[in-house]
Amino acid sequence: MSLDKETIKHVAHLARIDLQPSELEKLSEELQKILDFIDKLSALDVDQVKPASHILPISNVLREDKPQVSLTPEMALDNAPDKKGNFFCVPKILE
Amino acid sequence: MELNQFTAHELLAKLKNKEVSAEKILLSLQERIHKTEPKVKAYARVGEVENSAANPSALSLLKGLPITIKDNICTAGLTTECCSKILRGFRPPYDATVISKLKENGATIFALKANMDEFAFGSSCENSYFGPTHNPWDLECVPGGSSGGSAAAVASDEAIWALGSDTGGSIRQPASFCGVVGLKPTYGRVSRFGLIAFASSLDQIGPITKDVQDAAILSGIICGHDPRDSTSVNQEVPDYTKSLTGDIKGLKIGIPKEYFVAGLDTEVKSIIEEAIDKLKTLGAFTDPVSLPHTEYAVPVYYIIATAEASSNLARFDGVQYGYRVASDNLIQMYKMTRAQGFGPEAKRRILLGTFALSHGYYDAYYLRALKVRTLIKQDFDKVFQDFDCIVAPTSPTPAFKIGERAQDPLKMYLSDIYTISVNLAGIPAISIPCGFTKKGLPVGLQIMAKPFNEEMLFRVAHTFEQNTDWHKIKPKL
């Protein structure tokens, strides 16, 4: 699999990371090398193998739907870079 | 001997006999840190002095004894930044479950948090936003990673004992490089609530200590079911100190041939072989075994771990906590915040993981990796049908020089070639000191066991330790 710069730009957009041109250059080289190494996996025949989506034999852990004590709004907002009242502030979304 | 040099169980005995006070121990630690920290740099930040004091009404098991915590485990009110710029100034509003358990047992949470690779991404501590930690045995070498700060602090007596986290070897490899004991418990044995997630299906918190008894005591405190972690297993926690019998007669130990191939340093190899001979003279039987999919562990890991990391790290977007770059545009705010907040290795892993999960590549990479993970787990299941444990090197080399592998991510990834399979299979493993190279660098012996059989690890590790003196040797600083 070849990882061209357009693919990396697209992936960086999906991951919401702004890349400098020099970073793009370096990353495409490094990621290509890593991917070439990972491609080793394609040598294995895994058609009949089940994926290990979970390593433990447990599933769907549920609890009763009862209200519990949680963080207060003050505590939840304490670390926010920008806040107003009981809200996190972000740049304007609607025009 | 200074108080900071003792093990936790020795200090607990002294506290019980009222020979010393917790304040004296804390003072001794602070003096030590004042003296050696400028060389070792085991801690992420300096200056924060307000320790989270022991709860006087708590059970008195730990009697105010201080413990050092890795910077990715949430400590209420104490700065926790994962050694990343993007979490700058983050003070968690709650304690991780392991911290609550320590406090309930009377521990003092040491205010300085241990250095680490940013978000635990690394094998050398060089990826910390705060700069590298230095190996106490050779200051030009790395301490290993990602829990390098915890391991270096314990090795240099800047900590009595510590907690680290292990996703692909991040407790065991630095324990090996620094000549201390490090345990990665079975997946699900320790609650991950409050551990800032790297790869949720692999991460486990575990102890880094000066000897095996301390690791057993600390495990007894942090293990156990937690309703706040849906992957924590509801299984009784045994008294691990009862496993310290000193007897391994008749145990069957498997030696995996795939761990003794090209790439293993010849000096490390002969030290490990001597350790295996020692186990034999202590009454264990050893036989070669095969874990045929070992060579696929690193590629599988760098798909699964990065995929999970890319998802887990989506939460760092400049909205709820940490660093933010101002912008008029929301998407641009995210992109600039993450561009400036994450270091190069974090970006590499996020991009690799995003790629592996992205449309058109999911089946070829992520799904295939999950299937090979099954094969790796089956390798271990098969061996454990006939053997009590598996013994191998923790790392193919001793500690390497700072800067030596920093420019070559792939070379760095291969540092974890002997530790990664354990996380993929979910089994427990411990690293204990088993010798030194001619240059005086420690070498670690890794012992692996069946899921939820930490007792086997403590039994074998303790017996080896009590019949050798490697754990008693201290670095000269």
Image (spheres, coloured by chain):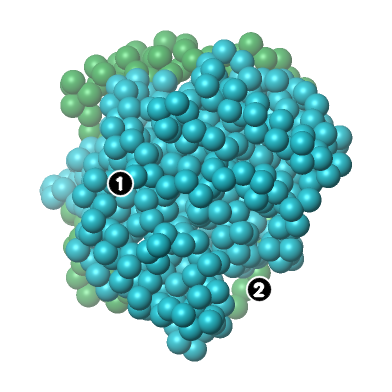
Chain colours: A green, B cyan
Confirm whether circles 2 and 1 share one chain: no
Viewer-proximal residue among B97 and B385? B385
Circles 2 and 1: CB distance less than 8 Å?
A: no
Residue B15 visible, this orientation: yes
Q: Residue at left 33%, top 64%?
A: B29
Residue B215, how many percent across, how many down?
58, 57
- Establish if B319 lies above or below B443: below
The residue tagged 2 is A64
Label 2, label 1: how far apart the Cα atoms are: 55 Å
The residue tagged 1 is B477
- Establish if B62 lies above or below B92: below
Residue B295 sits in quarter: top right
Left or right of B311 on screen, residue A60:
right
Furthest residue in direction front, as rendered: B1
Residue A53, how many percent across, how many down?
65, 39
Residue B71, how many percent across, how many down?
36, 55
Left or right of B132 on screen, residue B416:
right
Residue A57, how many percent across, how many down?
75, 49
Q: Helix, strand, or loop for circle 2?
A: loop
Furthest residue in direction bottom, as rendered: B57
Count neighbours of disc 1 (C-alpha within 10 A) and say few if under 14, some if 14 to 19, many if 20 or more: few
Q: Residue at left 86%, top 42%?
A: B250
Q: Chain of mark 2?
A: A
- Establish if B137 lies above or below B57: above
Residue B200 visible, this orientation: no
Please identify the quadrant where the N terminus of chain B is shown.
Answer: bottom left
Residue B2 sits in quarter: bottom left
Q: Residue at left 48%, top 83%?
A: B18
